[in-house]
Amino acid sequence: MISWRTGTVVSHGSGWPGATELVVDSDDGVTRRALAYDRLVGRPAVGDRVLLNVGAQARGLGTGGYAFVVGLPDRPPADAPAGPGHLVKARYTPVQSMVLGVDEQESPHHALLEDADDLAGLPVVVADLHSALPAVVAGARWAAEHAGRPLPRVAYVMTDGGALPAWFSRAVAGLREAGWLESCVTVGQAFGGDLEAVTVHTGLLAARLVVGADLVVVAQGPGNLGTGTRWGFSGVAAGDAVNAVGTLGGRPVASLRVSGADPRDRHRGVSHHSRTAYGRVALVPADVPLPVADPLDGPPPPDRAALLAHVREQAVALCAPHGRHRLVEVPAGGALLEALGRTPVRLSTMGRGLDADPEGFLAAAVAGVHAESLRASSGA
């Protein structure tokens, strides 16, 4: 279950809000890259003894390739100040923590959310992978700038299909620092956001009513889990998120997971994750933005033309008259690609950057472009 190690902190690496990288000499003779969540375990100092969980690191998992600090046995942090809040995240585990939920009785926002039931047409982009987040926001901002509109006020609702602590995400930290993201709302068992909520539904309502967002992105935290089976992947929840948006009167925008570089056939073109989540799980109609060649760029190279044709064929199967969703063509050309290159955080999906797999990021960006057009048409 857990692979335990003890060791001594020898240096600090980089850090960002909520997380500190460390180099630890563990007692088994291995020097390890470790991560401490400051608000859970305190900030280890050089020379501190630490208790580590090295299970994911030992298995060579990509996103989870850290040793995680579980505690400082010789210098535990002081108790948190007494305060309101009884939402327990990571429940019934040794690292469970108590937070104040935006929707609970002790919250100053409880009365606002108590009977809240309407997103009032708020555009909400739903994505499978966490790596789509900066690309969606970049697309929305580019569209607003291109049209001479005010930039959107964006909230991110982070579900619990991947990382549970929002602090693990450098993308969230970087987007917040750059002013591209107004707030992060962590829902379900995810925690560490600017606001905490019990469900996706109250997280969405808080994004509109508390944050004042006029555009929302819903996606799991870093660390998508897949098994190579039809149903065994954490992105199934993207379909549930579409249902939540539609039920609450929002405008769901289903961002396609696309790749032109993934070596696995099931993820080439439109991933089977998107096809299953939106085609089988989502029961309310959503807009499905389809990246198409930008006529301003001239004819695309043959390999890109073939990929876009394959993506179209797969996306059409999700949309009327074959499926329940609405197909929306959005040009994805050089101007949008340049905008993606100016994002304040590194773009990376499944270990591939913008140059290695541009179509994946363009597919997410056009979802942001379309969501921004919905915001503009609503007068927000």
Image: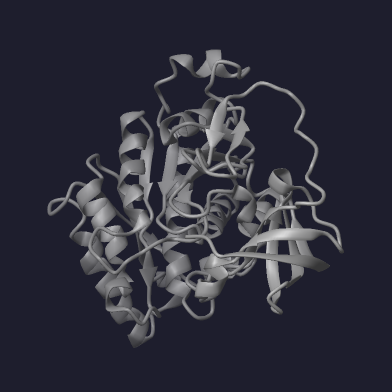
Residue 87 vertical placement versus 342 (above, below): above
Residue under the image location 59 percent in, 19 percent down: 109
Q: Is residue 282 visible?
A: yes
Tell which of 76 and 360 is nearer to you.
76
The residue most toward the left is 322
Residue 31 percent location from the top left of the image: 72, 77
Q: Is residue 298 left or right of residue 138?
A: left
Residue 64 visible in this rendered orientation of the protein: no
Q: Coloured how? A: one colour
Q: Is residue 249 above or below residue 168?
A: above
Q: Residue at x 43, y 28 (%)?
A: 119
Tell me which residue sits at (53%, 21%) in the image.
104
Q: Position of residue 353 (x, y in %)?
A: 54, 75
Residue found at the far bottom of this picture: 302
In the picture, residue 301 is in which quadrant?
Answer: bottom left
Residue 12 in the image: x percent, y percent?
81, 65
17 versus 64 height, above or below: above
Question: Does residue 261 sit above or below 160 in this rendering?
Answer: below
Residue 363, quarter of picture: bottom left
Which of the two residues, 253 or 327, is positioned nearer the viewer here? 253
Judge from the rendering whether residue 171 lies leftward or rightward of residue 288; answer left or right.
Answer: right
Work out whether residue 93 or residue 315 is closer to the camera in this orientation and state it: 93
Residue 176 on image: x %, y %: 68, 48
Instruction: Tell me what residue is drawn at x 61 percent, y 32 percent.
Output: 98
